[in-house]
Image (cartoon, rainbow, N blue to C red):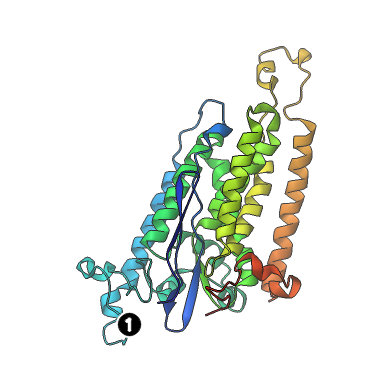
Amino acid sequence: MSGSYRDLEAGGANKNNMAPIRNSNRNYYYAAPTTSTTASHLYHSETTWTSWLVPMFVLANSVVFIVAMYINDCPNKNSGIRVRGHCVATFLGRFSFQPLSENPLFGPSSITLTKMGALQWDSVVNHHQGWRLITCIWLHAGVVHLAANMLSLVFIGIRLEQQFGFVRIGIIYLLSGFGGSVLSSLFIRNNISVGASGALFGLLGAMLSELITNWTIYTNKAAALLSLLVIIVINLAIGILPHVDNFAHIGGFLTGFLLGFIFLPRPQYGWLEQQRLPSGVRFKSKYKAYQYALWLISLVLLIVGLLIALVMLFRGDNGYDHCHWCHYLTCVPTSKWKCNDS
């Protein structure tokens, strides 16, 4: 079995990075889980929303994984097939896991994930299966992958939903996952990719832009910004390990960062109090001028960026043809590993 299982602690939470999973001669990438953070120092207003969408996302991801294991049916699918090792946890019946030599994350085969909607360049571009850009963010490579991502989603997403409501956070989560899938497809052609980390990185990006656009209402803003940047940099740096889809992380982060300027600005101080006064004495606008400027710039960049990326993708362009050094964003070769498709 090639590759290894790695842990990293940052901000008091575990960051898990797993090995490539092989099925015959095929590998697949997973979007690695983000380091979770409660970021309690970023918010000072009282909670006004009850979080229900994030728990529903956790439930949906878990149900999809159970369905994937049911379809995978390791004991029957592997019977009569010469494979390295035996199904794991056979007492689970058809829900037992693929041999660890094939999938060390305790999950299904890459064939099953591909059947269920894993991100695959050839299927998206040549077979017009654009829906894979969305379905891949609901799939996970194994129990370890699922648990790490869902824990991160709970720690990051619930607090954001309590602060800003399910509509805005739901839009940021889904669009960030989509943006991560688009960027991943532009660069990764020979492997499949699964995982919700593009969407999770989008929430981290939105946290950063929310802090920037609402800069004037926070105390200890420098410490909050520094700690958040450290968490983001550590997670992106871990993405340069082999077989981690860092393009999904980067695409999700950039999408969420722009969406944060669009959906998460807070009214300036004193505006809410003015609502109780007669209309003739109101003098403050709801948002500051720089918030409006950031909103407009982010909206334009987001629309233009996604349109250009989608045109390039469905035209069959290879991202590396336009960015020869971008392979260093997802894998840096060392004496311990090489960066190639195998």
Taking depth in this image into account, of 77 and 22 the one nearest to the observer is 22
Front one among 327 and 284: 327
Counting from the top left corner in percent of width and height, residue 199 is at: 55, 54
Residue 172 visible in this rendered orientation of the protein: no
From the viewer's perspective, tell me whether residue 33 is left or right of residue 208. left
Q: Residue at x 53, y 74 (%)?
A: 337
In this view of the protein, which residue sits in the foreground, 126 or 305? 305
Left or right: where 241 falls relative to 101: right
Q: Is residue 229 visible?
A: yes
Percent position of residue 153, x then y: 47, 48
The residue at 63%/64% (across/down) is: 182
Place residue 22 in its image quadrant: bottom left
Q: Which residue is mark 1?
A: 84
- 48 w.r.t. 255: above or below: above
User: Can you give x and y, in whole percent of width and height, for residue 340 in the image?
Assistant: 58, 78
Q: Quadrant of residue 214?
A: top right
- Give the side of residue 267 with respect to residue 282, left or right: left
In the image, what residue type sits under mark 1?
A: Arg
Q: Mark 1, residues whose alpha carbon is within 10 Å: few (<14), some, or many (≥20)?
A: few
